[in-house]
Amino acid sequence: MKKLKILLFFSLFIITVPFSVFAEREKGISLAISPLLTRINVAPGDSWSGFVEVFNSSEKDLHFTIILKDFRGGEEGRVEFIDTREIEKSIDKGKEFLLSQWININRDLIFIPAKESKALPVEINIPKHAGPGGKYAIISAAAIAEEDISSGTSVMVSPSVGSLVLLNVRGDVIEEAFLREFSTKRTLYTKPEVSFDVRLRNEGNTHIHPRGNITIYNQWDRVVENFLINHNTEFGNVLPQSERRWNFVWDGKESLFEMGRYKASLTLVYGEEVNRTITQDVYFWIIPLDFFLMLLGIVLFLLVIVTIAERFKQKYMD
């Protein structure tokens, strides 16, 4: 049976999923938050309201506070948090264009008993002059142990849980992406263990959530494997002006009858307003090592025969 290994490389949100799901356990603190991801599609001047719930799953009482951070897509799909001082130095943009400035939520120190939770109302007010496209922020819950509050000691907060907010302002939204790479590590393989790299860049002004597949065909044009890309996940977004990379490893069945030229066809679909499709093919060869050795043996055998024949001819026919 074929064994499929799907390796998701640093991609967007790969650092934020454990950031959100798994609670920090330093000093006995265990915290979680819900929802992990909120998608919002609004028009300038609109308002949105909802809740985030913080869970204290530790054995001790906790206080926590809310921290808001804006982020954008960085190189290789990594998240880059935005420094507000950088925005303040900008000539044509100010802090009022950051999503964190539009979010209203209780920022005071809030008490949660052990094994209980607290739901906080969230309201987002979009300015009438807000430009179209994506805005992104993380609502983080930072915890402090109850005994640290009582003792008045200086403590470190634990920014280990966060709820992602992906907001799109309607208007002249640009959804544009292009394929930077679809390739295999090599062109020739001695066994069907082939690694595929896919890199997609988002050149638009809002996030996209591409979905698709890689289909592998053998030399008889028969499908031997099919990989799904970004299906059944909410954490597969590509932020504007950033890239996302996927890596897939096909572990097929070794057989002399399966050697030959293979084709891998990539299809990606993205876009909320209009579905756009990206396709590309890549070719590679699989020649089993046993066949190589057999072929090498035949060549060496023929060379020996030819050499003996030449020597025989020189000795008895000259």
Image (tube, grey):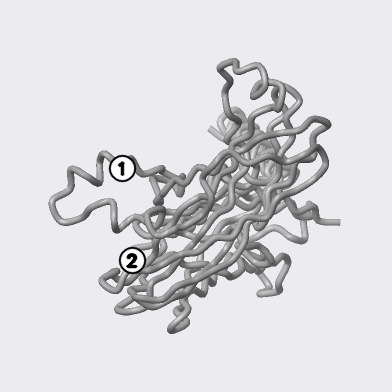
Residue 9 placement (x, y as % from top left): 57, 45
91 relative to 223, above or below = above
Point 81% across, 56% down: residue: 2
> Tag 1 or tag 2, which sits nearer the N-term?
1
Residue 120 placement (x, y as % from top left): 62, 55
Depth check: give the residue in front, 311 or 127: 127
Residue 302 placement (x, y as % from top left): 66, 41
Residue that sits furthest to the bottom in the current view: 274
Residue designated by label 1? 84
Q: Secondary structure at mark 2?
A: loop
User: As shown in the figure, which amino acid type bears the numbered disc 1?
Assistant: Thr
User: As shown in the figure, which amino acid type bears the numbered disc 2?
Assistant: Asn
Point 59% across, 46% down: residue: 162
Compared across the picture, whether 86 is left or right of 12 comes to left
Question: What is the quadrant of residue 20 in the picture?
Answer: top right
- Disc number for residue 209: none
Residue designated by label 2? 205
Compared across the picture, whether 167 is left or right of 233 comes to left
Point 70% across, 50% down: residue: 118
Residue that sits furthest to the left in the current view: 91
Residue 155 placement (x, y as % from top left): 58, 20
Q: Secondary structure at mark 1?
A: helix
